[in-house]
Structure formats: C-alpha cells, structure tokens
C-alpha cells in the first residue's frame, strides 16, 4: 500500500466526515455566532484538506492556496464580528 | 519514511475529526469556540509539519512554517473578538458554568441554556 492509496482511502474520508459534521452545526446553530465559528472550522479543515492533497499528489505548489485560505478565514471572522457589532449599535 | 508520514497524518486527521465532533456535541457557544481554536489549529499544524517533512529541500517548509505561524497568530485574535461580541450580545452560557467573573456586575438578566443533562462528576467539584 503506497502513501497515495492510504491518503485516498483513509485520510480524505476522515476529513470529509469532519466537514459534514461541521455542516450539521452550520445548519442547526441557534445563533449567528455558532454559524460563524462553524464556517471558521470548515475553512480550517479546508486548509488541512489542501495540505493533504499537496502531500498526496507530490505538488508543493498547492500550499499557496492554503495560505490564501488562512488569510480569508481570519478576515471573514473579523468582518462578521464587526458586522455584529455595528448591527447591535443601530 | 512513508510509514512515518502516514502515522503522523493519521494523528492529524483524527484530531480534526475530534474537533468536528466537539463542535456538534458541546452544549454551549463558548465551549464550541474553544474547540474550534485549539483542536482544529493543532490538527492543521500537524498536517503542515507533514508537508514540510515530505518535501525537504524545496520552498515548501518555509511556506508551511509561514502558514503555521499565521494560524497561531490569527486564530486566538479572531476567537477573542467573536467571543467578546457574543458575551456582550448575551448569548446563553451553559447552565452549569461555575466561574463567571462578571457575575455581580450585570445590569441585565444573564441568559443560560436550558439543557437538562447532568454534568460529569469531576466537573462539579
């Protein structure tokens, strides 16, 4: 069993299951903040998935995508909390 | 070397799965937020260290270390901002929360969750 086969049959299904469980919380979440942290967790798992695909396919260039994902996750969470702050004021 | 990479990345994937189960099962917004910050960042960091070990003599380890540094820098900041905003907006605390430093200083009624499940024994003491 090579490393690529192991990643295809074990690592990627575990990550896909984690994303599905997070989507349940995104659907159910009682408040807006629950949905925001569920989105944050989904993007973080997305960074892990891109890295795992980079290891599996032997292409190191995919880590640029992971870097952009990290940037977007931070900016999105900050922007949404600022939006909550502004909407609570008015 | 392949076996070593497989074992380490399995640990990372299981940690990420534990984070996802935690965000589904935790009773409270604040406990869910702690899961998102700690466990998911640890799992992704383990994956990035794996990538840095797979491609040793390229530009990949620098990129991986930069992403780890960026994640460790930004995830506590965003969690602090969203947690502060949730606490000010009176999002419900867990019913069995027993440390609340601002307990006497509210000018409004603090909300708590209405779950009926008992906490474990060692959390009560």
Image (cartoon, rainbow, N blue to C red):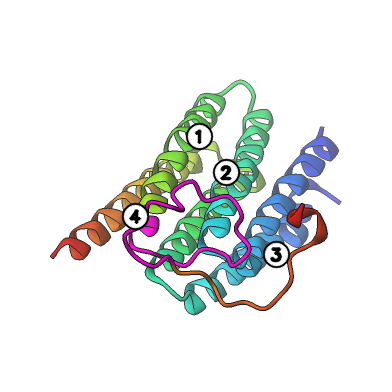
On the image, numbered disc 4 is attached to which residue? B85
Q: Predominant secondary structure in magenta?
A: loop
Q: Chain of mark 4?
A: B
Q: Earlier in the sequence, mark 1 or mark 2?
A: 2
- Residue visible at 41% across and 44% down? B80
For marks 4 and 1, give the CA distance: 21 Å
On the image, numbered disc 1 is attached to which residue? B72
Q: Secondary structure at mark 2?
A: helix
Q: Secondary structure at mark 1?
A: helix
Left or right: A65 with respect to A86?
A: right
Do badges 3 and 2 share one subunit? Answer: no
Is the residue A64 above or below the residue A19 in the image?
Answer: above
Looking at the image, do the residues carrying marks 1 and 2 touch, with CB atoms under 8 Å apart? yes
Dot 4, how many residues are within 10 Å of its Cα: few (below 14), some (14-19), or many (20+)? some
Q: Does residue B100 show up magenta in the picture?
A: yes
Q: Secondary structure at mark 3?
A: helix
Q: Nearer the viewer, mark 4 or mark 1?
A: 4
Left or right: A40 with respect to B40?
A: left
Looking at the image, do the residues carrying marks 2 and 4 touch, with CB atoms under 8 Å apart? no
Q: Chain of mark 2?
A: B
């Amino acid at each position: 069993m090579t490393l690529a086969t192991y990643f295809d049959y074990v690592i990627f299904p575990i990550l896909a299951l984690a994303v599905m469980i997070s989507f349940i919380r995104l659907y159910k979440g009682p408040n807006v903040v629950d949905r925001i942290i569920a989105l944050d967790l989904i993007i973080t798992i997305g960074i892990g998935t891109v890295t795992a695909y980079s290891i599996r396919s032997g292409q190191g260039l995919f880590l640029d995508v992971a870097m952009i994902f990290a940037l977007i996750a931070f900016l999105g969470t900050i922007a949404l909390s600022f939006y909550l702050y502004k909407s609570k004021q008015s | 070397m392949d076996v070593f990479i497989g074992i380490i990345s399995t640990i990372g994937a299981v940690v990420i799965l534990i984070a996802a189960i935690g965000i589904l099962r935790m009773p409270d917004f604040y406990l869910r937020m702690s899961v998102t910050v700690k466990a998911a960042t640890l799992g992704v960091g383990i994956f990035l260290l794996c990538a840095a070990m797979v491609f040793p003599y390229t530009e990949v380890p620098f990129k991986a270390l930069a992403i780890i540094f960026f994640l460790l820098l930004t995830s506590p900041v965003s969690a602090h901002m969203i947690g502060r905003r949730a606490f000010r907006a009176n999002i419900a605390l867990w019913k069995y929360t027993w440390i609340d430093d601002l307990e006497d200083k509210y000018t409004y009624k603090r909300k708590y969750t209405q779950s009926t499940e008992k906490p474990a024994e060692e959390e009560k003491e």
